[in-house]
Amino acid sequence: MPSQYQPQILGWISDLDKGGNYLTGADDRLLYANDNYCAFIRKTKSDQIFYVCLSGVISIGLMFIIPILIYLLTWIESASMLILPLVIIILFFITLYLMLPEFYQNLFTRRGSPIIFNRKTGKVYINESYFFNFKVLRNPLIFLHPNKKRIKEYDWAHLQGVVVHNFSRYSLNTTILMVCKPNTHKTIDHILLDPLRVGIGSYLVWGWVNNFMCANKLAGLNDGKYKWEQETQFKDNIIKGQGWPEWMVEAFNATSQAELAEIKQRHHVKQ
């Protein structure tokens, strides 16, 4: 049975239900939570180092190998002997095209690229590398701007969770938030929520976030790296100096739509 959210994302396993969830666990992804908002890390430092090294080695290797293979093609005299080398070169180009975004994404991600959920206003905030958008077909010119970022506010009501797999022998799963047009199942964007977990682990953060957003007590406010009274430390260590707009940092703690509207009006933010 295919996903109800279209176009369907590559590697789809299942759509996730919203609401209270007993399958829950913040694990080491939860940075901070208070009665208004919570913040989840999406890239651990160990993962970043590993994937920067892996994708970097592959990308650099292919940059040397592809020109050599192309040069060797000039020495092949028989047309029938060209087919296999050409196929290999095309596959190498595709691999390089996929590895470069992975390299940039991990290299330029700062402080784990937190995602913020405010349950009082129903808003979600991100500040992340451009390559988090999961596009397969990219304009090659964007590789000249690897540190391009998107800083956005989303409605929780328009975000739907899905689980996808990475096609590896280790069956690692990733939870993606599908951004849908209001009152439709048409996907217009994708947001990374919880990357690369084994089996059922990929459902735990989704469960915790849902419990938090519907004020279920299963989401403990002291489950994170920073305790609820350490908000100043959290913002100094994770948020400060990362390009978050001042109005958005204030909006993390907004307790109503009216307060959020007042913050935006004060900072001249277009509604």
Image (cartoon, rainbow, N blue to C red):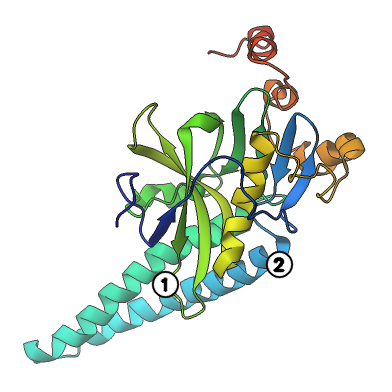
Res. 7 mark: none
Determine whether, in the image, residue 185 is placed left or right of residue 154: left
The N terminus is located in which quarter?
bottom left
Q: Residues within 10 Å of mark 1 (few under 14, many from 20)?
A: few
Residue 235: horizontal and vertical position, in percent?
82, 36
Residue 75: horizontal and vertical position, in percent?
20, 90
Question: Which residue is outermost to the right?
Answer: 229
Residue in the picture at 72% in, 20% down:
254
> In the structure shown, which secondary structural element does the residue marked by tag 1 occupy?
loop
> In the structure shown, which secondary structural element does the residue marked by tag 2 occupy?
helix
Res. 46 mark: 2
Which residue matches tag 1?
167
Q: Amino acid at mark 1?
A: Phe
Residue 191: horizontal and vertical position, in percent?
51, 45
Residue in the picture at 67% in, 53% down:
24
Residue in the picture at 38% in, 48% down:
141
2 relative to 160, above or below: below
Snapshot quadrant of residue 246: top right
> Nearer the observer, disc 1 or disc 2?
1
19 relative to 192, above or below: above
59 relative to 74, above or below: above
Snapshot quadrant of residue 201: bottom right
Q: Residues within 10 Å of mark 2 (few under 14, many from 20)?
A: few
Please tell me which residue lies in front, 243 or 122: 122
**Cα distance in 3D space between marks 1 and 2:** 21 Å
Q: Amino acid at mark 2?
A: Ser
Which comes before the other along the chain, label 1 or label 2? 2
